[in-house]
Each structure stands twice: as structure tokens, then as C-alpha cells.
Image: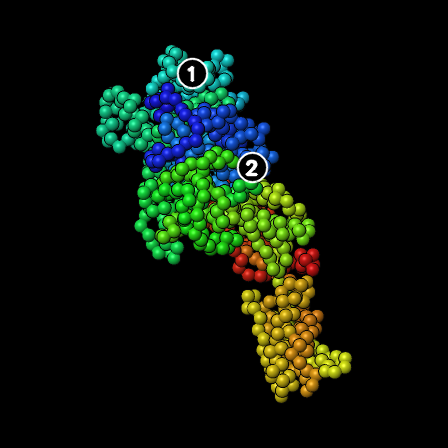
Amino acid sequence: MAQKNHEKGSTGGTPVVTEPDRVRNVVLVGHSGAGKTTLVEALLAATGTIGRAGSVIDGTTVGDHDPAAVRQQRSVSLSCAPLLHNGIKVNLLDTPGYADFVGELRAGLRAADAALFIVSAAGGMDAATVALWEECAAVDMPRAVAVARLDQPRADFDETVALCQRLFGDNVMPLYLPMLGDDGVSTEGLLGLITRRVFDYSAGLPADVRDPDPEHQRAIDESRDELIEGIIAESEDETLMDRYLDGEEITDEVLIEDLEKAVARGHFYPVVPVCAETGVGLDALLEVLTAAFPSPLEHELPAVAGVDGSPRPPLTCDPTGPLVAEVVKTTVDRHVGRVSLVRVFSGTLRPEQTVHVSGHGMADRGHPDHDADERVGHIYTPLGATLREVPLCVAGDICAITKSGSAETGDTISAKDDPLLIAPWEMPEPLLPVAIVARSRADEDALARNLARLVAGDPTLRLDRNAETHQLVLWCMGEAHADVVLDRLRAGGVELDTEPVKVSLRETLTAPASGHGRHVKQSGGHGQYAVCDIEVEPLPRGAGFEFVDRVVGGAVPHNYIPSVEKGVRAQLERGLVAGHPVVDLRVTLVDGKAHSVDSSDAAFQTAGALALRDAAERGQPALLEPIDEVTIRIPDGSVGTVMGDLSGRRGRVLGTEPDPDAEGRTLVRAEVPAIELLRYAVELRSMTAGTGTFRRHFVRHDPMPAHLADQAR
């Protein structure tokens, strides 16, 4: 920890490691504006990785190199920034804090072995961050908290720590307290609670380490007792608590060793105050990242199977083991081409190595199953958009490869002679549809190329070419996600527009009716002659279509009866009122006439269609709209608001129950017309402060209210 080895130097450059125990993979999480990207910049500058920290406002940071991130002044994608501190390579995985980019956050969690929660001392915390803490707790992921933005006017470290303890639970304890300057406002140093030393940053990094002033001693002693008791309670030495209670002085070395073990096991969560702008606490935080967070050797690896689904033994983080790696993110650079960020779980990835790339289970998102052997070219360590070539990437480390022809986000990279598949991570379902249309034929070609690249890199983006509405629909996570996707398409040279999303409707008849179809034409040579009479009757919802033959006496020759059915089915597809497919109908052929010369298959097809259209005029046609069953996961306090909103959407609540996976949350099940859910992803987030999620699936079609049906015709 920082108290143990605070005065050691740090080195920058291109970090290359050959042993997994010298790697730390840390994902930074927190709400948008908490200061994650700014903190990464400060850590990179403090270790000499970059010469000078960039600015989010100026668009000069390492992490936010995407044009959309620069324009919005917030992170929109996962970024990897490695640094070297005391011989340990730390891969900092900076994630977006906005809920629309949760797919990037999931990728960061997959690649990491520990999580650093960034909480603003002036901005509080959102409910989504609390939910993420609970998610990490469910898998025992080691965590620490950095209280940032200490230089802000409303910064309150004590209140922020109290908030973290209230929301995150037990064992969230500060290792340091901020030390104010002579003005009583600015933070100029830290008070080390274990070592009882002062770390003075008034002259910059490294801190000047000295004994505390008398006025600091009381604050140190009060907080130190609570910290020591928390550390001892998690100690593997069962005699330590008794010794402490008997008045024995526990040495700093023992406390630090037990603290590091408890943090690595995910049982203790240290809090470090930091200020990226002034450098306060940066070296202390680096010590937590390198000394307390676990190496990949201590983190459970995902399960693997053969590409045929056959079970395989668990992986170990062994550089000499079988090669197993995962593409956690794919981007397409206009100069370099496809760039894949890869976490190596087992084995060693080397340049010019032939590997097997497998991607399965994402066909519903526009990622068909694929398997291919490819040769890896160069291997790089990424620093934002910069790629620095390295000779290898060992198990536990993260690297980048370029120019892969098939690698997509979530794919497995394994040995050519023993291809494997890694169990996929949970990926949220995109639920906000955006219909796009290219402005010209040339734009259509460019749109197809650019969409293929975007879908390959973003598994939270789903592409739907709706054959009924003839719309090209992008399913996104939210408005901000949609804005970024459209920006990237336009940056790729595509001129496009958006249009209202159309919902696929159905038609039916609600009353029995009869229809007469007569198709008679004479135009020289063989004419066209077909007459048929039908009866139609509605069927229950979901029954589909039935065709019944009740012709007697050969009024319609047997060989033409299938022709009538074919014509009826074609008209059902074309629709009767508003051009939507017709469903839930029984059509009975009861009579007709034929001509020995002029009757034909085509003539009876036409007559069947005309008969159905004739019956529709008396069969009281109606429009049917799709009904989806939704399962909504929300905080308990939002139940009333959400259920009231569902009522306004013509929804029918089926029931509520406590969420079995999370305390304080409720599952609401309801049936809602699909047309009322077009923007529900955005509106639910607004109602629940960003913490509500939902799933949906189609259940049936129901009649549309008359006033809405009139608008849809």
C-alpha cells in the first residue's frame, strides 16, 4: 500500500510483462462526470506514461479519442490505458458512466480482475453505481473506492465516505484523510491512518512524508481505531483480534499485509481520497492498485467448451497452457482497419501465430455463428488510440491485434489444433428502435458496409431489416447510444435520415361473410375464365389460416382448387384494408364455375383473391396490433410510478414480485401494446433515475382501438 512503499519511483514507457503476477487489470466505474477519465490521465502522467495529462473539455485525453466522445465531452466507449508502477503493469480500463453504453461497461468488467469505483466528493452517487456495486459483490470481485474531485467548491470527503458506507455496506473504510491547506479549503495532503504519517503534496509529487502536527493527531487516532478493527475482523489470523483487544500493539507491517489479503479476496474495500488536478493521493492510489488488487492468477476464469459444446476442464492462468483469449472490444479504424482488444486468459499470444477465431450464440443480434483460422500479425499494447508493438502477450494480460478478418466482440481466440469457446458474458438487450433510410443508392452501399463494421464491434446494437414494414431498424440502448451510432455512420461517408418506426400490424375479419370472385376476359386466342364463391369466418386469436374445400359436383375442377387457395393466401399477405397481412381466418370454397378452354391456374388465383376482397367489404375488417409481455425490474420506490405509467400505455399488469436476485427491487410483469413501447427504454430510465430495466417478448395480436386503427389506415 502507499503507506508501505510510498517513496518508490515509477516508470513509464511501453510496459511489457512475461509473468501474470506482474499484471493488474482494473476497470474504472462510476456515473458520468465522476472524473474517471480525468483520473486516468493523471495516473498516466504521474507514472511518466504520457508527458502531460490531457483535458476532457479540450478533447485531448487518451481515453476519449472517439470523435463522439470529444463532441459530447464524455466517454462513449471502453478504453485501455496501461501504465507501469514499481514493476507492475496496470491495465486501466476506463468505461463510460452513462447508462446507454452499458455494453462497454460489461466488456470492461469481463476483462478486469478488480473494480475501482470513482465517486465525486462534490457530485454524490447515482443508483446505477450502487446497482453495479451489488453486481460486483455477487461475484466477489475485489473493489476499492477513489473519492475524486476534492478541489471542487462543494467537495465533502466525510459526507461522501458516509454515503459510500450507507449504500455500499460494511468494510468500506478510508485509508487516509484529506489534509486541508492553510486556507482551510484546498486539499494539500493526506493523513495516513495506518502509518500515522502526513503525506504533504504542496510541492507536488512525490509527497513529502513527515510526522503529523498535533492538531492532526486526534483525527488520525479516531479513524485509525475503526480501520484497524475492520482489518483485523477480516484477518486470516484468528488470534489477532484477541491480541488487539488485550492491548497489544499490532505492527504496521501485519496490518498492511492483512489489509492487502482482504482487499484481494473481495472482503474489504479501501477508500482513497484523490485529486487528479493537484496530484494529491495519486501515488497512494497506485499502491492500492498494485499491492492490494489481485493478479490474474487469483481471479476465477470463465468456463470453456469445445466449439461443438463438449465440456472442457477449467482454465488456469498459465502462460504455457493452451491458448484461450477473448475479444472484449472491436473497433474499425479508417487507417488501421479492424482493431480487436483481447484479454488473454491462458497461454501466450505471439506475432505470426495461426489461431482459431470462434463466435457462436449471437445470431439474433446480427452476428452469425462463425469459425475461421487466421494468422495474427503484430501484437500491440494499446494506449487509447495509440498502438505500441510488443513481442507477446501472456496469460492475464491485455493486448490489441489488427486486421483480423472475422474477429468480433465476444469471440474466442484459441489454438488452431484445439478450438474452444468461452462462456459468453451477459449482454443487455437493445430496446430503443431507430429507423434509418439512406438518401441515395450510393449511400445504401456505403450504409451496408458501415453497418457491418458497427455491428461487428457493438453487441448491444441489433440490426433488423423488417420485411413487412420495409424499414431498416437499428435497435439501440438509448438516445445517446443512437446518436453515437448515427454519428459514426455519417463519419463513414453515409448520408442518411431517420423516420418514425412502424409497428408490424395484422388485419382480420370480425364477422362471417361471403364473397364472389369472377375473372373473365376475352382478348383473342385463349381467354381467362374463373368464378368462385367463398365463405369466410373469423377464428380465435392465434389460430392462423384455414382453407376448406366444400365444392360439390365438380363446379370447380379438382386441379384448380389449390389455385383458389394460392390466390386467397396471396391476398392475405397483401392485406385487405391497410396493406397488412390478414390472420385468424377460415376460408371455405363452396362453389364456382370453370371453362373447358379458358380456365387456368392463374385465372383461379385471381378469382380467389377477388372473392376474398369482396367478402372483406361485409366482414367488418379490423386491425390487430402486437402485444408484448414485459418484465420490468425496478427499485421498490418506483413501483407506483411505473404501474401508473403502464396504465397510461394501455398496459395490463399481470403481477408483481420481489426480485429474487436483488434486495430492494421489484419485478413487474405486464402485457403492453408494442406500439406503446417504442420509446419505453428512454422513459423507464427517466422514471427510475437510470436503474430500471425491462425485457420483452411477443405474445399475440389484439384488436387495435378504433381511433388508433383509423390513424393507422
Q: In the rendered structure, which disc, 1 or 2, sits on the residue that comes first in sequence?
A: 2
Q: What residue sits 42% from the left and 16% below the top?
A: 200
Q: What residue sits 62% from the left and 65% below the top?
A: 581
Q: Depth check: give the residue in front, 510 or 268.
A: 268
Residue 581 located left or right of residue 54? right
How far across and how far down the image is residue 121, in percent?
49, 26
Q: What residue sits 71% from the left and 80% below the top?
A: 528
Mark 1, other Cα within 10 Å: few <14 / some 14–19 / many ≥20: many
How far across and how far down the image is residue 365, in percent?
51, 52
Q: Amino acid at mark 1?
A: Asp
How far across and how far down the image is residue 149, in percent?
50, 25
Let me know if residue 68 appears in the view: yes
Q: Which mark is residue 363?
A: none
Locate the N terminus by quadrant. Answer: top left
Label 1 – label 2 distance at C-alpha: 37 Å
Q: Amino acid at mark 2?
A: Asp
Q: Which residue is mark 2?
A: 66
Compared with residue 152, is residue 583 higher up or lower down, i.e. above or below? below
**Quadrant in the picture for residue 27:** top left
Compared with residue 587, is residue 668 higher up or lower down, i.e. above or below? above
Q: What residue sits 37% from the left and 34% below the top?
A: 17
Q: Which residue is mark 1?
A: 200
- Secondary element at tag 2: loop
